[in-house]
């Protein structure tokens, strides 16, 4: 593919402010992000529900209908690609942590269910895991979608790299006390797989309404922070371009230098 540039805006939503009307609140932030004229708008993880997981089935979006209508309408309105972070979605008797992706025409181009569920009592007990990989092409660029805990499994994200992903979109709802871990994971996956990583984190407060999470960031293939939101509500925007990607891949050859024979012998 010829040279390209993709401008990405990651939206960091405050769960405390969004909980009364999450869909209306998400819409207001998508409108704001669209004013920056991005090619892609990325939302955080599970922005539609902020209660305890045992209550999510009751409040989940049934078959993703409400989420689809909102994101499709806004993608078409603003002529922008929207990577919908993730929502709690009910299908039949099961609950999924699901990302819906829409192109500029408002057409849905990917549905991805979170593959790695966090520990029992937090997510595994209430949600069903997805079995597919989140590969999608946006504006002719090979992209991928991962959700929160997925990013802690380098072997899974390596699968994206081996499928040619140039930009990885990652939605998070990260605990405040582990925010440094989130940044380390984002930057590590970018370096290891020589791709851009766009992360959008849900902003939460701890029990004392003090320490905040969030952590939205845009990272280069060399692991450099191109933009970051820290622990404040808002939007971070940066342009990813093929020249920087090519430079990183010429600098190191991680994918070419893999020892697949050795990995197979010792467990992978």
Image: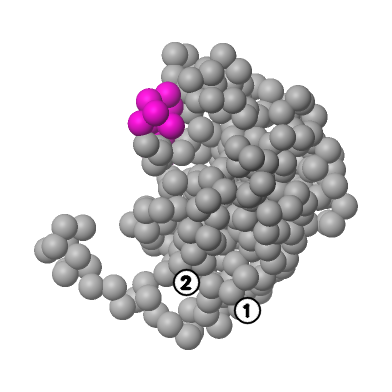
Residue 153 location (% of width, % of height): 37, 53
Q: Is residue 5 above or below residue 171?
A: below
Viewer-nearest residue: 229 or 143: 229
**Could you tell me which quadrant the N terminus lies in?**
bottom right
Upstream in the sequence, badge 1 or badge 2?
2
Q: The magenta stretch spans which residues?
A: 120-132
Secondary structure mostly seen in the magenta stretch: loop
Mark 1 neighbour density, 10 Å: few (under 14) some (14–19) many (20 or more): few
User: Who's the residue at 80% across and 29% down the image?
Assistant: 24
User: Who's the residue at 83% across and 56% down the image?
Assistant: 37
- The answer to whether 32 appears left or right of 221 in the picture is right
User: Who's the residue at 60% across and 37% down the image?
Assistant: 207
Measure the alpha-carbon separation of dots 1 and 2. Answer: 16 Å
User: Is 127 inside the magenta-drawn segment?
Assistant: yes
**Could you tell me which quadrant the C terminus lies in?**
bottom left
Residue 39 location (% of width, % of height): 74, 56
| Mark 2 element type | helix
Q: Which mark is residue 243?
A: 1
Q: Is residue 256 above or below residue 215?
A: below
Residue 192 location (% of width, % of height): 42, 69
**Residue 246 lies in what quarter of the image?**
bottom right
- Looking at this view, name the residue that lies furthest to the bottom: 251
Q: Which residue is mark 2?
A: 191
| Mark 1 element type | helix
- Looking at this view, name the residue that lies furthest to the front: 208
Residue 125 location (% of width, % of height): 38, 25
């Amino acid at each position: 593919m010829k040279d390209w540039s993709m401008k990405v805006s990651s939206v960091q939503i405050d769960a405390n402010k969004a909980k009364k009307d999450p869909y209306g609140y998400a819409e207001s932030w998508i409108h704001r992000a669209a004013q920056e004229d991005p090619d892609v708008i990325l939302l955080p993880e599970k922005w539609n529900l902020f209660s305890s997981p045992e209550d999510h089935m009751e409040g989940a979006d049934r078959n993703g209908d409400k989420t689809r209508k909102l994101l499709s309408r806004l993608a078409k309105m603003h002529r922008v690609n929207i990577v919908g972070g993730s929502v709690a979605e009910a299908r039949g008797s099961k609950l999924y942590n699901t990302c819906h992706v829409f192109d500029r025409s408002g057409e849905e181009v990917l549905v991805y269910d979170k593959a790695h569920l966090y520990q029992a009592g937090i997510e595994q007990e209430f949600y069903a895991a997805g079995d597919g990989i989140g590969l999608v092409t946006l504006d002719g660029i090979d992209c991928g979608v991962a959700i929160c805990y997925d990013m802690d499994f380098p072997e899974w994200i390596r699968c994206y790299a081996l499928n040619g992903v140039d930009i990885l979109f990652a939605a998070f709802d990260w605990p405040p006390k582990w925010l440094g871990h989130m940044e380390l994971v984002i930057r590590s996956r970018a370096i290891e797989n020589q791709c851009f990583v766009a992360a959008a984190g849900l902003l939460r407060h701890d029990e004392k309404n003090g320490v905040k999470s969030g952590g939205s960031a845009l990272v280069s293939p060399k692991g450099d922070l191109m933009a970051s939101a820290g622990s404040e509500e808002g939007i971070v925007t940066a342009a990813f371009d093929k020249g920087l990607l090519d430079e990183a891949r010429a600098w190191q050859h991680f994918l070419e230098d893999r020892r697949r024979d050795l990995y197979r012998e010792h467990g992978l």
